[in-house]
Amino acid sequence: MKELKYLNKYFLKYKGRLILGVFITIIATVFKLVVPMKIGDSVTIVKQYMNGDVTDLALVKHELLINILLLLGAALLSALFTFIMRQTFIVVSRYVEYDLKNEVFQHYEKLSLGFYKQNRTGDLMNRISEDVSKVRMYVGPALMYSITTITLFVVVISYMFYKAPTLTLYAIAPLPILSVAIYKLSVLINHRTTIVQQYLSKLTTFTQESFSGIAVIKAYGIEPRTNKNFEELAEGSKIKNIDLAKVQALFFPLMMLLIGVSNILVIYIGGLRYINGEIAEFGTIVEFLIYVNMLTWPVAVVGFVASMIQQAEASQKRINEFMETKPDIENYVTEKTPVKGTIEFQNLSFTYPDTGITALKNVSFSVKPGETLAIVGNTGSGKSTILELIGRLYDVEEGMLNIDGTPIKKLNLEDLRESIGYVPQDAFLFSDSLRNNIRFGKEQASDEEVIEAATNAAVHENIIDFTKGYDTVLGERGITLSGGQKQRVSIARAIIKDPQILLFDDCLSAVDTETEEEILGNLKRISKKKTTLLVSHRISSAKNATKIIVLDEGKIIQQGTHNQLVNTEGYYKELYAKQLLEKEM
């Protein structure tokens, strides 16, 4: 149960509702107790009349009518309070589910980029959906049934001891055996539930990746192989679920057996004691039979609750694994720190913590507001890493990265990222309208601002050609659009934010040269007072930059203006000549 201690804060948060639920449970249970009492009284009255101890038939009928009315009233009130009790506990469980899902999601957002490189999306989704649902069953039904069972046991067994102590001991004798059996089975359930949840995560991950990569699967014609792999995973999941079901299936037969034993003991021992005069009223035996059967569901539900608790603990353990993961990037500053945009790298080296690959080696440069720095180099030379470090997606460990003369860690992280407009190499769009995808950079932007941003990104004309224009809803990851259109929508999303720092990571690679020139011209106008860093493989994108640096294996091998570099032997001049030749051809 130690994993479930994490939920105690929610119990404290909703303690008022839970206390009310306990109070209502006690009332409902007391009314339930009236039913067997009045049935027992009625049986006793009829027995006394049949034996001649009571001769007044009218009195017997009157007593039976009163008991029937009390029975009906108690049953109706018990049903009403049981309904209110269920509403109270189940509603609390939904509140906790809502809070926990939000907490998990918010924690996911805080975790660093390296975390997402090490964990699969399907597993993350499974923990926030299936695992949280299992936990909800513990907070709601399991808690409700536990309180109901405890209350019923306390009230009913206390009354049974009051009426016939010896007979009560015989009636509840099988319960300790049941407790031991439940403990043994619960251990097995906990182990097998963990395995089932792991298989569910694998299935979710495989399915999510298959649907996301369906175009590749179809292009390579590997649907049969994909189906086979899915069937193997599903078969493994089925076997583990059956193993779990076999253990769970032992609960109810075992409980019904022990309840049957209790009934036999009540009839046999109770009958003997009544014959011997040790029990005064025959109705007491009938009462006890009803009480024992009233305890059937609570006793049966013990196994059900134990199963839910074990499953919830296994799920909460999986949730806790991620909730206990600390983000690598932390905000060390609480006060506001406005960003103007001067960026300075001083002898900076960086190695990715998850792969151990050294991406940057002793890199130094500076760029000021109003300037554009173009970064050119081969694939894997460290270009994108520079942009990731400026956005503090990773922390600098060796060397210095200063923003406005202040070490980047001493800036408020929210203010830093709010001041950045970032267009990644792999343009990501949401399954939403084009308007909302552009507004993602500025949620309250007007339609005029959206159109202006799209125009500056040279995508407005494409958008109005769609049947629904800006209301066109995109497929997953923007699959509705071409590569160039996705890149331009991403650029519009960054522009509309009007940030102080603009970071473009090879975001014009899928755009034709004419459109590229138009976008670059608009960006030059927009970014007059902004700091701009532009990663590109194209000389045409870099040539108008204030300064250009050339990276190779993490080192700066050349830097200067376009005119300086094309007149200097080296990588830049060779790349320029090659691309110029390709353009002429």
Image: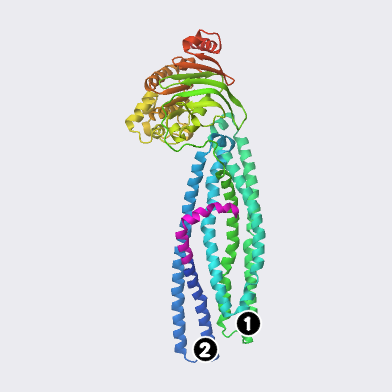
Residue that sits furthest to the front in the current view: 405
Position of residue 253 relative to residue 422, above or below, is: below
Give the labeled residue for mark 2.
49
Residue type highlighted by circle 1: Gly
Image quarter of the N terminus = bottom right
Residue at image coords 63%, 79%: 166
Mark 2, residues whose alpha carbon is within 10 Å: few (<14), some, or many (≥20)?
A: some
Horizontal arrangement in the rendering, residue 442 relative to residue 555 (left or right): left
Residue placed most toward the observer, 485 or 559: 559
- Callout 2: SS: helix
Residue type highlighted by circle 2: Tyr
Residue at image coords 59%, 20%: 553
Q: Main secondary structure of the magenta part?
A: helix
Q: How many marks?
A: 2
Position of residue 422 relative to residue 543, above or below, is: below
> Residue 18, position in %: x, y?
47, 60
The picture quadrant where one finds residue 349 is: top right
Position of residue 569 relative to residue 357, above or below, is: above
Circle on res. 98: none
Mark whose residue sits in front, 2 or 1: 1
Using the numbered discs, state the Cα–Cα distance from disc 2 to disc 1 in whole angstroms: 20 Å
Q: How is the image coloured?
A: rainbow
Give the labeled residue for mark 1.
271
- Callout 1: SS: helix
Q: Is residue 398 magenta?
A: no
Residues shaded magenta: 1-23
Q: Is residue 290 visible?
A: no
Q: Is residue 9 magenta?
A: yes
